[in-house]
């Protein structure tokens, strides 16, 4: 839960120093490799294609693990958010959950290809890392209202997402160029032998995504602790626990008097579930359907981060001009189109009409038409995902009462996590039931459409 913050008149009118904003933005740079390397483009496809028995079971198990982490976050976020709000400070929470991210990510090294005994360890480590990454991000986001005036929230939110995308892209380029090697050639994408003597046959380059994520976070989170001011401490932990539980009930009651904001929170809950599942399963889908290796998935990820960076920056400006709601609905429209189109392509065909060559080992990067179409759709997904997330944060600022902005930030975070397990869970169940990875993705288009429908009832007053 995003802990409530009181935005004073001075904080709302005068931006924080550039060093404070830079430290806050660099947190996104520090945390993004977890989502890029582990959750989407490197480790998740490696797990599904090499550690699990087959890609279908691998996608299902990864989806169930994502769901388990979502349940834990939903159960813990209201309590921890209320306690953090009462205590005041945010950095101790970021440090604690950051260490959980570091520990879980480091343990992912233990997963080995063809070693089913490592599956349980990998999934538990992934759940721990997910909880750590999500909560650390939540408490970092809770600092946002104290950094810039409300009329600049859209640009700050978009800048944070854009810098995060660039950080994810740089970590991915490093992985592909110096660590991940093809099992056939033993060389990286740029033709080098992997650093540190990593064994390509044992997929040690892919497994290194975990330790690299941990080290990356430890290094680049430092500016946040050095330059971004924290909220002053209000009370000791014991008193904060008692006060937090007491205020939690009042916060839930308060939102009932603001039906318009509640409608937005429900919409956010639905479409964010779909987005979480899409990023969790997109790389796994490509590995299973097209047989993409880590190098191909990594290049696909670089494309997504490039389009995501551009989309987040452009979306931030459109947010402050056209409005957050318009940006969100447009982003959902693009995402739905991309998911539906993905369902119409597969190995050997495009739109079930045009027959094409079937992907084969050694045929080159993205050699067939279905792969190239998937590449284009991936770029579209990246361009839409950044604005969707950034505009959702800023829309809450425009909807919630100024004097209660902190309370509603808390409920916003809860709405984004309380059912975060539903999308991956439904996609996993459908994947197993029909033994088809495409069928699992079809559930996500339905979630996007429902979320957009609910959002259409939200009233937004223009200045």
Image (cartoon, helix red, strand yellow):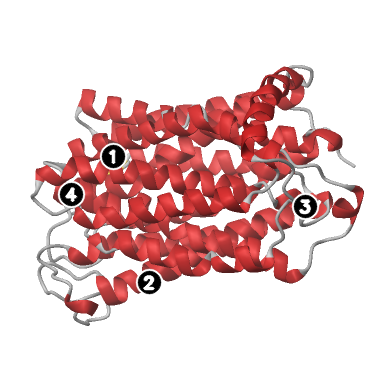
Closer to the camera, 275 or 446?
A: 275
Q: Answer with mark 1 or mark 2, whichever residue precedes in sequence.
A: 1
In the picture, measured across the screen, residue 297 lies left or right of residue 235, that is left
Looking at the image, do the residues carrying marks 1 and 3 touch, with CB atoms under 8 Å apart?
A: no
Q: Is residue 113 visible?
A: yes
**Crowd rating for badge 1 (residues with CA inside 10 Å; few <14, some 14–19, many 20+):** many
**Residue occupied by mark 2:** 173
SS at badge 2 = helix
**Residue occupied by mark 3:** 146
SS at badge 4 = helix
Residue 62's mark?
A: 1
Distance between mark 1 and mark 2 Cα atoms:
24 Å
Q: Is residue 215 above or below residue 63?
A: below
Distance between mark 1 and mark 3 Cα atoms:
37 Å
Q: Is residue 257 above or below residue 306?
A: above
In the picture, measured across the screen, residue 14 lies left or right of residue 76, that is right
Q: Answer with mark 3 or mark 2, whichever residue precedes in sequence.
A: 3
| Residue 234 percent location from the top left of the image | 74, 43
**Residue occupied by mark 4:** 49
Closer to the camera, 219 or 46?
A: 219
Q: Answer with mark 2 or mark 4, whichever residue precedes in sequence.
A: 4
Distance between mark 4 and mark 3 Cα atoms:
45 Å
Residue 384's mark?
A: none
State which mark lies toward you, 4 or 3.
3
In the picture, measured across the screen, residue 41 lies left or right of residue 325, that is left
| Residue 237 percent location from the top left of the image | 62, 39
Closer to the camera, 359 or 305?
A: 305
| Residue 224 percent location from the top left of the image | 61, 63
Q: Answer with mark 4 or mark 1, whichever residue precedes in sequence.
A: 4
Distance between mark 4 and mark 1 Cα atoms:
11 Å
**Can you say which quadrant of the picture contains the N terminus?**
top right
Q: Residue at x 57, y 29 (%)?
A: 79
């Amino acid at each position: 839960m995003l802990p409530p913050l009181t935005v004073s008149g001075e904080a709302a009118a005068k931006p924080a120093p550039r060093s404070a904003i830079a430290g806050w933005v660099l947190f996104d740079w520090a945390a993004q490799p977890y989502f890029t390397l582990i959750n989407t483009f490197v480790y998740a496809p490696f797990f599904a294609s090499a550690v699990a028995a087959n890609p279908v079971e691998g996608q299902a198990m990864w989806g169930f693990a994502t769901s388990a982490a979502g349940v834990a976050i939903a159960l813990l976020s209201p309590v921890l958010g209320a306690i953090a709000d009462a205590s005041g400070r945010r950095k101790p929470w970021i440090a604690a959950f950051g260490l959980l991210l570091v520990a879980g990510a480091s343990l992912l090294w233990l997963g080995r290809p063809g070693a089913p005994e490592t599956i349980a360890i990998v999934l538990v480590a992934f759940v721990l890392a997910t909880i750590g990454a999500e909560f650390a991000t939540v408490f970092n986001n809770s600092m946002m209202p104290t950094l810039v005036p409300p009329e600049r929230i859209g640009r700050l939110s978009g800048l944070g997402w854009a810098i995060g995308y660039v950080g994810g892209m740089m970590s991915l380029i490093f992985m592909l160029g110096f660590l991940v090697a093809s099992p056939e050639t033993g060389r990286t994408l740029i033709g080098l032998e992997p650093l540190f003597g990593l064994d390509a046959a044992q997929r040690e380059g892919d497994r290194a995504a975990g330790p690299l994520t941990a080290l990356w976070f430890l290094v680049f989170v430092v500016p946040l602790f050095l330059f971004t001011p924290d909220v002053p401490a209000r009370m000791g932990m014991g008193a904060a626990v008692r006060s937090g539980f007491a205020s939690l009930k009042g916060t839930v009651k308060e939102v009932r008097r603001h039906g318009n904001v509640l409608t937005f929170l429900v919409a956010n809950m639905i479409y964010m579930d779909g987005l979480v599942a899409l990023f969790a399963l997109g790389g796994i889908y490509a590995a299973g359907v097209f047989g993409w290796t880590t190098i191909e998935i990594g290049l696909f990820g670089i494309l997504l981060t490039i389009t995501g960076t551009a989309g987040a920056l452009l979306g931030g400006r459109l947010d402050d001009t056209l409005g957050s709601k318009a940006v969100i609905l447009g982003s959902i429209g693009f995402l739905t189109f991309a998911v539906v189109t993905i369902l119409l392509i597969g190995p050997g065909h495009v739109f079930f009409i045009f027959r094409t060559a079937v992907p084969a080992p050694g045929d080159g990067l993205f050699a067939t038409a279905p792969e190239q179409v998937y590449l284009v759709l991936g770029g579209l997904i990246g361009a839409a995902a950044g604005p969707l997330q950034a505009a959702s944060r800023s829309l809450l600022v425009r909807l919630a009462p100024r004097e209660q902005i902190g309370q509603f930030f808390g409920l916003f975070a809860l709405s984004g996590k309380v059912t975060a397990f539903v999308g991956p869970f439904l996609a996993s169940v459908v994947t197993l039931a029909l033994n088809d990875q495409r069928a699992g993705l079809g559930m996500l288009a339905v979630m996007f459409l429902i979320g957009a429908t609910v959002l259409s009832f939200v009233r937004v007053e223009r200045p």
